[in-house]
């Protein structure tokens, strides 16, 4: 069986002395002294206290100093409340935003280090809406690698591509020399020459995410825009079949047959009618 002992609160002897002299347990409401404590103070005699500090006989002086301290505290509290209102209106929050640059993260970490002299770490992270896991991940980042996103530090991400390797992949994907090489063969070729050691799926993912377009040339010739043209009669015949269902339900097959050379003559005559100057 474990016994949990609550921490005992200590009060200044001058506070007890003033309450006993005024017989008023509610003189200092900001201290939140329990009723049982003030009752025991009023019932018992004052103890003998030996102190090296100067004794303040006038309570009014003490209250004046307290008022000055409260005034000094209210000013920065008002400034902080105004800044919080601006942040709420702007909609910015570290909870739903990323800081890709290491300079921004370092600035937040320096602010947290300064604030830890006055507030505990948990309260600071709640004010910033920053998760503890995210904060400690930034703190664990090695100084030589930095805290930038997509870090190329070999100790923290050994399988991540460096900016030089990404540039080499882009150069080979968009090069005219490899425009007809499949992505799988291109990735293997880059490994064989010792330039980039990455899988073909990584190459395809980078090309898809960053919109790299591979240069292509037309392999097949262009289709002719002019159809079949006969040079003499009975060279090419065209047949068109249409099925017509009449009222009695009988299907009638209608065949239309025309000579290609006759179609060419009809086209000439139609052109002459539309434009008499055409020969």
Image (cartoon, grey):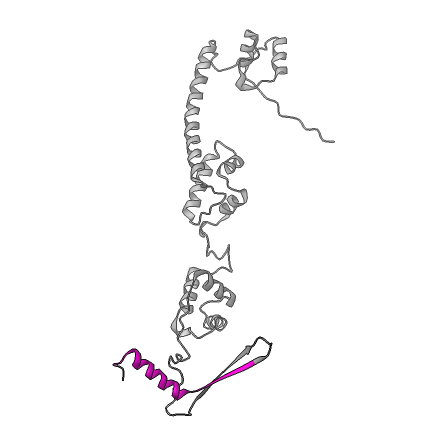
Give how far across and how far down residue 162 sits, in percent: 45, 60
| Residue nearer the viewer, 199 or 1 | 199
Please, is residue 229 above or below residue 164 in the view? Answer: below
Give x and y (percent) for residue 209: 46, 60
Q: Quadrant of the N terminus?
A: top right
Residue farthest to the left, as pictured: 277
Q: Is residue 275 magenta?
A: yes
Residue in the image at 39% along x and 85% along y: 263
Q: Residue 269 appears in which quarter of the rendering? A: bottom left
Residue visible at 43% across and 14% down in the picture: 64
Q: Overall secondary structure of the magenta stretch?
A: helix
Q: Which residue is drawn at the image coordinates 47% and 72% (left, top)?
A: 186
Considering depth in this image, is 183 or 193 the residue closer to the camera? 183
Q: Percent position (x, y) of residue 22?
A: 54, 7
Give the residue at the far right of this rendering: 1
The residues colored magenta run 252-276
Q: Is residue 116 left or right of residue 263?
A: right
Please state which of residues 189 and 252 is positioned toward the viewer in this rendering: 252
Residue 88 falls in which quadrant of the image? Answer: top left
Q: Quarter holding the C terminus?
A: bottom left
Nearer to me, 222 or 231: 231
Q: Is residue 146 left or right of residue 270?
A: right
Q: Can you give x and y, in whole percent of width and height, for residue 75 in the image?
A: 41, 25
Side of 33 relative to 186 (left or right) = right
Q: Is residue 138 depicted above or below 52 in this figure?
A: below
- Residue at left 35%, top 82%? 267
Residue 11 magenta-highlighted: no
Q: Can I make out residue 15 in this image?
A: yes
Residue that lies at the very extreme toward the front in this rendered image: 248
Residue 199 visible somewhere in the drawing: no
């Amino acid at each position: 069986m474990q016994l949990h002992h609550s921490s005992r609160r200590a009060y200044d002897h001058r506070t007890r002395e003033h309450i006993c002299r005024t017989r008023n347990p509610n003189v200092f409401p900001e201290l939140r002294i329990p009723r049982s404590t003030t009752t025991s103070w009023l019932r018992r005699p004052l103890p003998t206290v030996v102190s090296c500090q100067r004794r303040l006989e006038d309570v009014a002086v003490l209250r004046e100093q307290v008022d000055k301290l409260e005034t000094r505290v209210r000013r920065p509290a008002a400034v902080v409340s105004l800044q919080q209102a601006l942040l709420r209106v702007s909609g910015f929050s570290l909870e739903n935003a990323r800081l890709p640059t290491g300079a921004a993260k370092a600035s937040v970490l320096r602010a947290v280090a300064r604030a830890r002299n006055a507030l505990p770490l948990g309260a600071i992270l709640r004010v910033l809406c920053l998760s503890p896991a995210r904060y400690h991940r930034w703190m664990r980042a090695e100084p030589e690698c930095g805290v930038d996103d997509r870090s190329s530090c070999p100790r923290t991400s050994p399988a991540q591509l460096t900016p030089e390797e990404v540039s080499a992949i882009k150069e080979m994907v968009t090069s005219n020399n490899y425009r007809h090489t499949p992505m799988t063969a291109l990735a293997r070729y880059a490994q064989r020459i010792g330039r980039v050691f990455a899988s073909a799926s990584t190459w395809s993912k980078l090309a898809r995410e960053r919109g790299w377009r591979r240069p292509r040339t037309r392999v097949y010739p262009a289709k002719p825009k002019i159809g079949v043209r006969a040079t003499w009669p009975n060279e090419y015949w065209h047949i068109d079949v249409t099925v017509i269902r009449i009222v009695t339900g009988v299907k009638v097959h209608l065949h239309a047959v025309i000579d290609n050379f006759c179609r060419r003559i009809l086209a000439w005559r139609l052109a002459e009618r539309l434009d008499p100057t055409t020969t």
